[in-house]
Image (cartoon, rainbow, N blue to C red):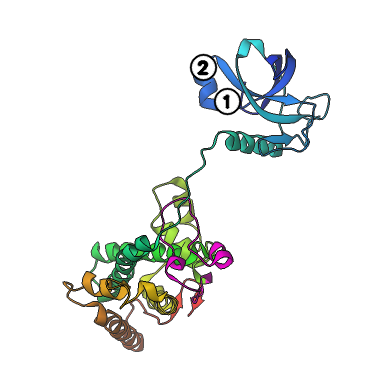
Amino acid sequence: MKPGDVVVGMLEGAAETKVRPAVVIASRTYLVERPDVLVGILTTKLPRPATSTDHVLLDWQAAGLRAASCFRAYVLTIHRSELTVIGHLSEQDWRQVQACVRAAFERKEEVMQPEPIQIRSASKDVAWEYATLLGSALEIANGHGSPMSHLAQEAFLVHLRNLSEFFREGIPAFKKAQTPPDRPRDNIYAVDFCHSVGWNPKPFGHDTTLIKAINKTVSHMSYSRDLASKGHAHFEGYLHLHGTVKLMRQTWGDFLRSVKSEFLQPRCSEDIHYWLDQHTKDWSVKFSDLERRFETRVNELVHEAQERERKGIPGFNWTLDQTPDGRV
């Protein structure tokens, strides 16, 4: 017996116990470890209307049933000796039945909407993400050799992913209501601070090469990560760092121009600008000088690459204004 099997047996219903069909919804692990089976009943009484936990079978005949039937998330536990397998659901029907079971048992996440005091406090976190993004970019450009160069790039990509989500999430709901949108977790969104969306979120979409490259590099250890490494999405510091920083600087500037006055000085003394300075006050390069130092260093690297190329010396050829998705 396996998940998705269609069975018949003497099964309890809402009104009576009788011989009726059902679908095995227990997992393979459950079926290996236990003698009983979890099933969801099938009925020929089609619901009017169907709910999110009902599914009218598309391939009922191929599943061994005599009449058009509907899965309902009416779950029973019964010993497998009392059941007879008569067929198996098609792939499309089984996917829908699994979705019905999830809908029946999922726990709805609590949603939250940030208050102004929370948004003001979040200025510290947002500033940290941007300051460390620029700081790690400068360290990559400075060049430290392995393993420090790899560590700097991973740090850069982590903060880049955080800021990409920050600029991407919550926008459709914000545009409808013009208020900080509800969310299932307490993530901070750029729109929480803003009176409008003055930046372009498209470069940070899930389907962009940039985001795919980030996720491939800093994902959890998994077999899918190994498969992804054979794909085309990749982030190379010497090719993509300058353009990606330029893209983020443009987005950051557009974001700051969209921030409500209540989250900026003088109304908010500890605003994002305040925290950018505070976070970097003990760094060797302060925030006010990070962007200039980064631009200077990358332009030096480009010049050095041109000189090497002129002399026929191999090496990494740094480029300007390029991201994994093309030119900025």
- The answer to the question of whether label 1 and label 2 lie on touching residues, with beta carbons closer than 8 A, is yes
**Mark nearer the N terminus (1 vs 2):** 1
- Disc 1 designates what residue? 26
- Disc 2 designates what residue? 34
Side (left or right) of 210 relative to 96:
left
Residue stretch in magenta: 173-202
- Residue 210: x, y in percent? 47, 67
* 75 up-or-down from 271: above or below: above
Query: Residue 311 or 26: which is nearer the viewer?
Result: 26
Q: Is residue 196 magenta?
A: yes
Side (left or right) of 275 relative to 21:
left
Q: SS at mark 1? A: loop
Q: Amino acid at mark 1?
A: Ala
* 89 up-or-down from 36: above or below: below
Residue ranking furthest to the top:
81
- Residue 246: x, y in percent? 40, 79
Query: Residue 283 or 314: which is nearer the viewer?
Result: 283
Side (left or right) of 323 relative to 284:
right
Circle 1 Cα neighbour tier, 10 Å, few/some/many (<14 / 14–19 / ≥20): some
Which residue lies at the image location 44% right of the left edge and 63% below the top edge? 189
Q: Amino acid at mark 2?
A: Arg
Residue ranking furthest to the right:
67
